[in-house]
Image (spheres, helix red, strand yellow):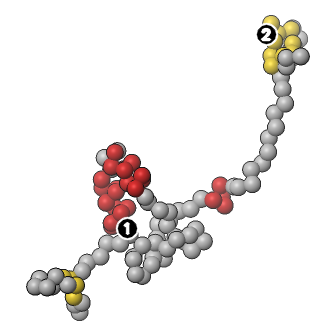
Amino acid sequence: YHGTEVLYSGVSGMMMEAQIFMGLVYYQRLRHMVSDKYQCRATGPVNKYTRQPVKGRKAGGGVRFGEMERDGLLAHGASFLLRDRLMTCTDISTADVCGKCGSMISTIRQ
């Protein structure tokens, strides 16, 4: 037995000319659901020392944007998006530097 059957048309009742393969198909529900796995972030908590988003989906953290993602955006010519993701959205900051010694100084702004 090779798994082929002769089938008959349900409309006309005539035998179909081709032999059709029939077999068992097993389906199983996956344990992981998309609604449990997805992660997105527009705003949220940041580490006060590094100004980077905190880690972890439970903490409302960000997804890592690594070297391969950076290279992919560079290859597609999306430099504005790259600047936005890697600088503007995460850790943009200003620092005052002493012109004589080159060390960072703290200034009081009013």
Secondary structure found at label 2: strand
In this picture, residue 30 sits left or right of residue 98: right
What residue type is disc 1 on? Cys
Q: CA distance from mark 1 to mark 2?
A: 61 Å
Q: In the rendered image, which residue does mark 1 sit on?
A: 89
Residue shown at 42%/53% (left/top)?
Answer: 69
What residue type is disc 2 on? Ala
Residue shown at 37%/50% (left/top)?
Answer: 71
Q: In the rendered image, which residue does mark 2 sit on?
A: 18
Q: Quick check: can you spot residue 11?
A: no
Binning the other alpha carbons within 10 Å of mark 1 as few (below 14), some (14 to 19) or many (20 upward) gives few
Binning the other alpha carbons within 10 Å of mark 2 as few (below 14), some (14 to 19) or many (20 upward) gives few
Residue 105 versus residue 8 in the image, above or below: below
Residue 55 in picture, x, y percent from top left? 52, 71
Residue shown at 65%/55% (left/top)?
Answer: 34
Residue 63 in picture, x, y percent from top left? 50, 63
The residue at the far front in this view is 101
Earlier sequence position, callout 1 versus callout 2: 2
Residue 91 in picture, x, y percent from top left? 35, 72
Which image quadrant: the C terminus? bottom left
